[in-house]
Image (cartoon, helix red, strand yellow):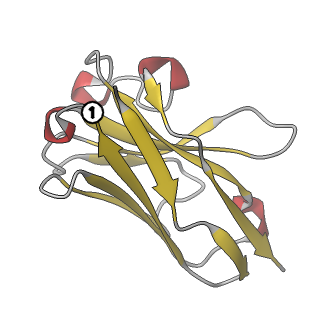
């Protein structure tokens, strides 16, 4: 079955960096669009970044644009999120998600969690000031 496993979270000081990974299995990773989401305590899950099948097209939430970079290695079935210049407001649990139904074709509603139908368990990122 489809499995997404995130790793790489941790605690860092403001201004630091982390690289999250998401290992995918149980489906043809290189044939589907992927996204990263995050959820802070008491807040709704929000879309952070999106990447197309070939990795050419990416989208970011305004709050992370210029600081975060999403990428993928289809040969290794792995999705990445490089996070630089981290801020305390980036503190959240981060999830990777797969669009197995083509709902984000052409990037449509990539930021909507309803567009994805496979999720990992998440990895915690805590940024202290």
Q: Which residue is drawn at 80% across and 37% down?
A: 43
Determine which residue is flagged by label 1. Answer: 26
Closest to the observer, 67 or 23: 23
56 left or right of 7?
left
Q: Which of 21 and 5 is in front in this view?
A: 5
Residue 93's spot in the image, x, y percent? 68, 50
Compared with 44, 64 (above or below) is below
Residue 105 location (% of width, % of height):
24, 23
Q: In which quarter of the image is residue 90?
A: bottom right
Q: How crowded is mark 1: few (under 14 residues within 10 Å), some or many (20 or more)?
A: few
For the N terminus, the quadrant is top left
Residue 31 picture location, percent across and down: 14, 33
Q: Image check: 102 left or right of 61?
A: left
User: Is 118 placed above or below 125 here?
Assistant: above
Q: Residue at image x 56%, y 80%?
A: 17
The residue furthest front is: 1
Q: Dividing the image into 4 quarters, which one contains the C terminus?
A: bottom right
Q: Left or right: 101 with respect to 68?
A: left
Identify which residue is drawn at 60% across, 47% down: 122
| Residue nearest the viewer, comparing 61 with 118 | 118
Q: In this view, does 78 lie above or below 1?
A: below
Residue at the (49%, 53%) spot, across then down: 6
Residue 37 or 78: which is nearer the viewer?
A: 78
Q: In this view, does 6 lie above or below 32?
A: below
Residue 51's x, y, as percent? 29, 45
- Tally of numbered discs: 1
Q: Element at badge 1?
A: loop
């Amino acid at each position: 079955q489809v499995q997404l496993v995130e790793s790489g979270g941790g605690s860092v000081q403001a201004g630091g960096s982390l690289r999250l990974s998401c290992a995918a299995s149980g489906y043809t990773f290189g044939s589907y669009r992927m996204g990263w989401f995050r959820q802070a305590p008491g807040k709704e899950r929000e879309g952070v970044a999106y990447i197309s099948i070939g990795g050419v097209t990416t989208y970011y939430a305004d709050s992370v644009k210029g600081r975060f970079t999403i990428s993928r290695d289809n040969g290794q079935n792995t999705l990445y999120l490089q996070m630089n210049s981290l801020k305390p407001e980036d503190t959240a649990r981060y999830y990777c998600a797969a669009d197995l139904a083509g709902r984000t074709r052409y990037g449509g509603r990539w930021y909507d969690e309803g567009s994805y139908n496979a999720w990992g368990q998440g990895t915690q990122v805590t940024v202290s000031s």
